[in-house]
Structure formats: C-alpha cells, structure tokens
Image (cartoon, grey):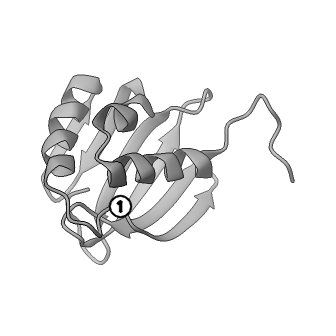
Amino acid sequence: MPISRDRFDPIAVAVDWLDAGKLGDLDGLLDLYDERATLECDCEGVTLTGREALSAYWAPKLDNSLEAAFTLDDMILSSDGVRLDYQNYEGKPVRIYFRFTPSGKIAHTSCGLLGQRCAA
C-alpha cells in the first residue's frame, strides 16, 4: 500500500535518525525530533524533554561513538510507531521505540539494551 504524499513514512524517519547518528550530525538528529519530544533511557535513569536536553544527551555520545555505532540490526513498523534494533554509540545492541507526531517528527523515544536496559 503506497504512502500518500500528505503522510510521512515512519520507517524513513527512523532511517534518517540512524544516518544522522552514524554521521555524528547532532543538528540533523535533533531536527528529527519535535520541540517537545521526550527521551526515556532506563539504564541511565533519565527522562529528557526538549531540544536543549536532547542536545546535552546526544552530543557526547555522537562525539565518542564507535565506527559500528548506529548500524541497523532490525526494524519493525508497529501500530504506534517504529521498533528499531541497532548498535548504540558503544557498539552494544539496543532496542529503541519511536512514536511520532502527526507531522512526522519524533515525539517520544524509549530505549534499552536487548535483554536489559541501556543507553541509546
């Protein structure tokens, strides 16, 4: 079933997110998020909201990521967003869930190591 021109492709947004991470493109990554987006990272015990908080979270991770970081392992479209399995900035396997605004911006992410909780 083709996606209409007035609807966004959640898989494409998730792939753009991976690409921005792989490139270390902080601005590109942040531009994918809604201004009021939240990020939940259970392993670090944080819930963050807004561009400034997300920037503070992602900047050191992107600056110190391994070459294998942001490599796709699996991606599934779900009824409320996208589930993505990938290698985090340390090269560890992570599962992250994306929920989106109607306009296609990331509204919420939550992540954890496969089998346990971890950093994105």
Residue at the spot 44% in from the left edge and 47% down from the top edge? 17
| Figure quadrant of residue 88 | bottom left
In the image shown, does 80 or 83 lie closer to the viewer? 83
- Disc 1 crowd, CA 10 A, few/some/many (<14, 14-19, 20+): many
97 relative position to 48: left or right: right
Instruction: Classify 88 as above or below 33.
Output: below
- The image shows residue 115 at horizontal and vertical percentages of 29, 78
Q: Position of residue 13 (x, y in %)?
A: 54, 44
Residue displayed at 58% across by 33% down:
104
Task: Look at label 1 and name its amino acid.
Answer: Phe
Residue 19 drawn at (x, y percent): 43, 51
Choose top left, top right, bottom left or bottom right for residue 118.
bottom left
Residue under the point 50% across and 60% down? 83
Quadrant location of the N terminus?
Answer: bottom right
Q: Nearer the viewer, residue 97 or 56?
A: 56
Q: Which residue is mark 1?
A: 70
Q: Which residue is at the front of the view, 58 or 45?
A: 58
Q: Residue at x 52, y 53 (%)?
A: 15
Q: In the shown orientation, is residue 65 left or right of residue 3?
A: left
Q: Position of residue 61 (x, y in %)?
A: 17, 50
Q: Quadrant of the C terminus?
A: bottom left
> SS at mark 1?
loop
As drawn, is 98 to the left or to the right of 30? right
Q: Is residue 10 above or below residue 111?
A: above
